[in-house]
Image (cartoon, rainbow, N blue to C red):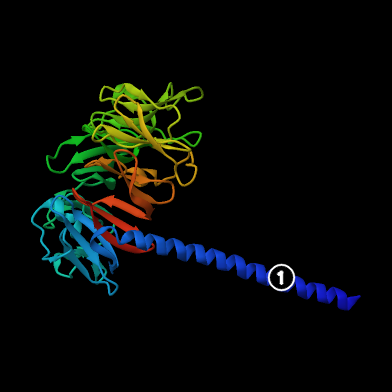
């Protein structure tokens, strides 16, 4: 009896091992087959920079087609839209993103990616440049703003507890428990800007700002003017996209205030610059920016392309059902999904691809990342490799 049980156990182990091997073989075959298919499709693409050429590629100035590339041995180069190396330069503040913070003797400064020092290491902390300005500190806690020459352009002064760059020339600072915003180019200060935690540029001269209060997993937002005052009678929003062709996707929290939010309605759709929703999209999870008369609208089980009347021109099925809760990175995921020169980047829930005006795939959705990199170029990432594609 014992021998019989032992024999059965051994047979079971052998069968389990065989099944595991078969399933593993099928799994790895499917992965290898998928990669092989992707690479065969890649041969049809016009590569300005092939996938295995550099470790990474970053767009610095898409208007002038300047890109920073990095190699496996941590060297960095500047290339143009043809993939050719060009000399480093810093002739305008818009190009300031090429400056890299570096540490020397426990101090921080800025240098070109090729190692040439532009601003000597003299700061206790140094943050990234954005549109020609950066936040730095001395004495551990004294924060101030410098330009690309290392010159101080703004100091909050005594008793200023914090300094935060909102976007480019706009900085938020806290003083005597009040929050103010300064335009460091003009020196104009907007005092007591309220309870805002983070901002993004919504276009049409407006900022979207998250509040520092929340309820029911909702983080309310305001639309602010360039003087950082709430617009549309202080209307609260659950989502705010970006304006394009005078329209912006929003989710209004109708009837909600900071004090009263037990009974409110969500009004979902595209809003005009007067604050009125003119295209209602009740089932949408998120709406992308309008461009060339079209916008991509993401629902749970389909991705629609609509025109400025709200009519559906075509729809696509995503790779997986899209979750209603988009996650913290949804603005990043969908920010590039708009039409340019008759084509649009699409995120299908797993990967990125490119479609034409009729909804046909020009580039299959196989890339982990895809962003516009000039009028006729795309930056892509595939399984840890970076490349740049020219569009035909």
The image quadrant that residue 192 belongs to is: top left
- Left or right? Give the position of 237 relative to 230: right
* 178 to 346, vertically: above or below: above
Q: Mark 1 points at which residue?
A: 15
- Left or right? Give the position of 307 relative to 78: right
| Residue 101 shows in this picture | no
- Left or right? Give the position of 24 relative to 359: right
Q: Where is residue 365 in the image (x, y as percent from the top left)?
A: 38, 51
Q: In the rendered picture of this protein, how many numbered marks are placed on residues?
A: 1
The image quadrant that residue 281 belongs to is: top left
Which residue occupies the extreme left position in the image?
A: 91
The quadrant the N terminus occupies is bottom right
Q: Could you say which is closer to the camera, residue 200 or residue 388? A: 388
Q: Could you say which is closer to the camera, residue 337 or residue 212? A: 337
Q: Position of residue 111 (x, y in %)?
A: 17, 65
Q: Where is residue 351 in the image (x, y as percent from the top left)?
A: 40, 51
The image quadrant that residue 24 belongs to is: bottom right
* 139 to 341, vertically: above or below: below
Tag 1 secondary structure: helix
Q: Could you say which is closer to the camera, residue 24 or residue 359? A: 359
Residue at image x 37%, y 46%? 333
Which residue occupies the extreme bottom position in the image?
A: 3
Q: Where is residue 302 in the image (x, y as percent from the top left)?
A: 44, 37
| Residue 348 shows in this picture | yes
Q: Could you say which is closer to the camera, residue 184 or residue 294? A: 294
Mark 1 neighbour density, 10 Å: few (under 14) some (14–19) many (20 or more): few
């Amino acid at each position: 009896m014992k021998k019989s049980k032992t024999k059965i156990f051994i047979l079971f182990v052998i069968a389990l091992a065989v099944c595991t091997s078969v399933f593993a073989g099928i799994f790895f075959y499917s992965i290898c087959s998928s990669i092989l298919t992707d690479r065969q499709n890649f041969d049809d693409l016009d590569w300005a920079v092939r996938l295995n050429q550099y470790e990474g590629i970053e767009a610095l100035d898409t208007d002038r087609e300047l890109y920073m590339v990095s190699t496996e041995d941590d060297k960095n180069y500047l290339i143009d839209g043809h993939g050719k190396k060009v000399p480093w330069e810093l002739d305008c503040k818009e190009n300031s993103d090429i400056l890299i913070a570096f540490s020397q003797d426990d101090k921080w400064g800025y240098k070109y990616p090729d190692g040439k020092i532009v601003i000597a290491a003299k700061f206790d902390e140094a943050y990234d440049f954005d549109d020609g300005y950066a936040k730095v500190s001395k004495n551990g806690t004294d924060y101030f703003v410098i330009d690309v020459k290392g010159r101080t352009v703004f100091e909050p002064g005594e008793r200023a507890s914090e300094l935060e760059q909102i976007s480019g020339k706009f900085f938020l600072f806290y003083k005597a428990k009040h929050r103010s915003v300064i335009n460091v180019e003009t020196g104009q200060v907007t005092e007591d800007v309220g309870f805002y935690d983070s901002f993004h540029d919504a276009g049409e001269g407006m900022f979207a700002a998250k509040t520092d209060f929340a309820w029911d997993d909702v983080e309310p937002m305001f639309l602010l003017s360039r003087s950082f005052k709430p617009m549309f009678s202080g209307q609260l929003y659950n989502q705010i996209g970006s304006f394009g062709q005078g329209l912006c996707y929003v989710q209004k929290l109708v009837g909600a205030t900071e004090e009263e939010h037990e009974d409110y309605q969500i009004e979902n759709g595209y809003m005009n610059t007067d604050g009125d929703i003119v295209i209602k999209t009740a089932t949408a999870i998120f709406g992308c920016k309008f461009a060339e008369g079209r916008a991509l609208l993401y629902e749970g089980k389909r991705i629609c392309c609509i025109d400025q009347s709200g009519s559906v021109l075509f729809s696509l099925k995503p790779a997986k059902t899209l979750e209603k809760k988009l996650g913290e990175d949804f603005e990043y995921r969908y920010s590039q999904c708009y039409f340019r020169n008759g084509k649009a980047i699409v995120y299908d829930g797993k990967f990125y691809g490119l479609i034409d005006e009729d909804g046909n795939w020009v580039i299959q959705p196989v890339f982990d990342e895809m962003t516009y990199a000039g009028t006729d170029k795309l930056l892509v990432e595939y399984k840890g490799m970076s490349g740049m594609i020219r569009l035909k």
